[in-house]
Amino acid sequence: MSVLLLVRHGQASWGEADYDRLSPRGVEQSRLLGAALAGRAVRPDLVLRGSLRRHRQTADAAIEGARWEVPVVEDAGWDEFDHMRTLSGSVDWQEIEGETYDDRVLRFEATIERWASGRHDAEYHESFPAFTSRVEGALARTLDRLEPKQTAVVFTSGGPVSWVTAALSGGGVPAWGRLSKVVVNSSVTKVLAGRRGTNLISFNDHAHLEGVGADLLTYR
């Protein structure tokens, strides 16, 4: 039986011009994760990451924290969907002067729901079905790389983690919509693959952040 650990990247730079980089808090989250995995005797045979900078920075910090010596393979199939291009594909999205942070988050989530609905696929650079197909392809490639009893750690984003979870649990798009709102930065989702197929074991484990500091628990 093979083990696949899906890691959401550490906190990025939500609300800034360049989102695709870890905040100092995100770096610390990632280091704590690496140390926690090493403390649980996790020794990956394979480490993969998406192609985004926040994936690379998370992987680097976690590997440093764990003191692993393992090559890292890049697979862009694990990338998040392009938020900005998805937002620009929605006729409902535009800047609103004086909008609060919480209101902006709610409106952002509503826009993503529109994208995932399947009713406007032609308007988007990458439709939701294309996104899920890409993630499923990345999952299949990762599992193909693993021998029985080997472990892979994948550094990716909340969208792919939520889709793998939703697909393996049979929840589909509705479950993805709910799960993608609550994926904790640097959390771990565990998948097992073996004679009984590929199965979800746990979702969104963030025990390495508990008891350390309330400011380390983030979702953006």
Image (cartoon, grey):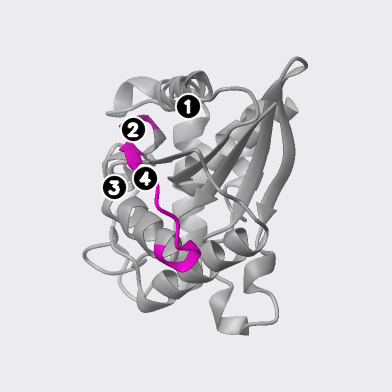
Image location of residue 121, percent across then percent down? 39, 22
Q: Mark 4 or mark 3: which comes first in sequence?
A: 3
Instruction: Give the numbered dot on residue 52.
Output: 3
Q: Secondary structure at mark 2?
A: loop
Mark 2 or 4, nearer chain start:
2
From the image, tell me which residue sits under label 4: 92
Image depth: mark 4 or mark 1 in front: 1
Is residue 71 one of those drawn in magenta?
yes
Image quadrant assignment for residue 190 = top right
**SS at circle 1:** helix
Which residue shows up at 28% across the image and 58% down it?
20
Where residue 15 appears, x then y in whole percent? 33, 68
Whichever of labels 2 and 3 marks the residue nearer the N terminus, that label is 3
Q: Tell me the kind of residue under disc 3.
A: Leu
Question: Rounded to the nearest whole Å, what is the CA distance between mark 2 and mark 3?
Answer: 10 Å
Q: Amino acid at mark 4?
A: Asp
Which residue is depicted at the point 26% across and 41% down? 85
Would residue 157 appear left or right of 4 to someone viewing this image? left
Write the start and end of the magenta stretch as one range.
64-77
